[in-house]
Amino acid sequence: MTKIKTSSFFALLYGFAFAASAMADDPLLPPETSIEKAIDHYIGANWKDKNIKPGQSADDFTWLRRVTLDLVGRIPTPLEARSFAQDKDPAKKTKTIDLLMKSSGHIRHQTREFEYLLMNGTRGQLVAYLGKALGENRSWDKIFRELLVADESNANAKGASEFLKVRVNDLDRLTNDVSVAFFGVNVSCAQCHDHPVVHDWKQDHFFGMKSFFSRTYEVGTFLAEREYGVVRFLPNKGKEKQADYMFLTGKKVAPPGLTEPSKDEQKKEKEKVEK
């Protein structure tokens, strides 16, 4: 069976997102169900629910072209196309996927895809870090942690801090970019007002997320973290308020350092960090 790697994250995401409405009323499959069968099941349920008739299966050449473009970012070579057409093995599609996913071309292609997802619109680069992380098949949650913790003393995460460095001077952008890239939610509207359409997103959500980044700042070419972090904002109605440290789920936490120190204390801390 074809193994689903970290770099197949998008395939899983698209498959289950497409079938999300069907999953609401359909009981979950047993945990031992293979990924292939689970995706087919939920997509099929979605088709049935919406009375959609699937098109005809792609022929061998079309299938090979699509899969090769998806997995390594190029079209098949003439030799690959002939070999695939002449292969009589019923499992040739699975073998082809395995072969492509084990290739260096797959790592390069996925590195470019994730680089675009995470760094589009910035001048930063994550190519070296992502190439190593995806080449080692690191889990998506580990990549997420390494990008946001940005521990520059961790040799395995070298270069990951670039994600924060190019955004740390614009915490509003950092807040929304993290929400979009990692949680699939654009909360930019909630920066100025409660979302007019998605009533779940309030200003409290935006500035609650921003609070988590308020301690981080750049010192020369390095990232540092203050012992305090306070974010204040002006709601549409009412007086200025201090934001709670709050996740997008609405869960709040109360870390130390919620009281902003005096100017002199801030100056001393800055001098301490810069020594």
Image: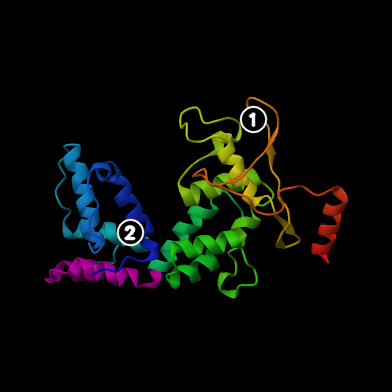
| Quadrant in which the N terminus is drawn | bottom left
Instruction: Give whichever of 92, 249 is nearer the camera.
Output: 249
Q: Residue at x 22, y 46 (%)?
A: 26
3D distance between C-alphas at marks 2 and 1: 47 Å
Task: Residue under label 1, please give it.
Answer: 235
First in sequence, mark 2 or 1: give its number: 2
How many tags in the picture? 2
For the stretch drawn in magenta, what is the main secondary structure?
A: helix
Which quadrant holds residue 134?
A: bottom left
Instruction: Give whichever of 28, 190 is nearer the camera.
Output: 28
Q: Secondary structure at mark 1?
A: loop
Q: Is residue 110 magenta?
A: no
Task: Residue under label 2, please give it.
Answer: 69
Instruction: Give whichever of 60, 99 is nearer the camera.
Output: 99
Q: Which mark is residue 79?
A: none
Tell me the magenta residue range.
Answer: 81-105
Q: Position of residue 108 (x, y in %)?
A: 44, 66
Q: Residue at x 22, y 67 (%)?
A: 94
Q: Residue furthest top?
A: 237
Q: Is residue 104 magenta?
A: yes
Q: Is residue 27 above or below residue 223?
A: above
Which quadrant holds residue 224?
A: bottom right
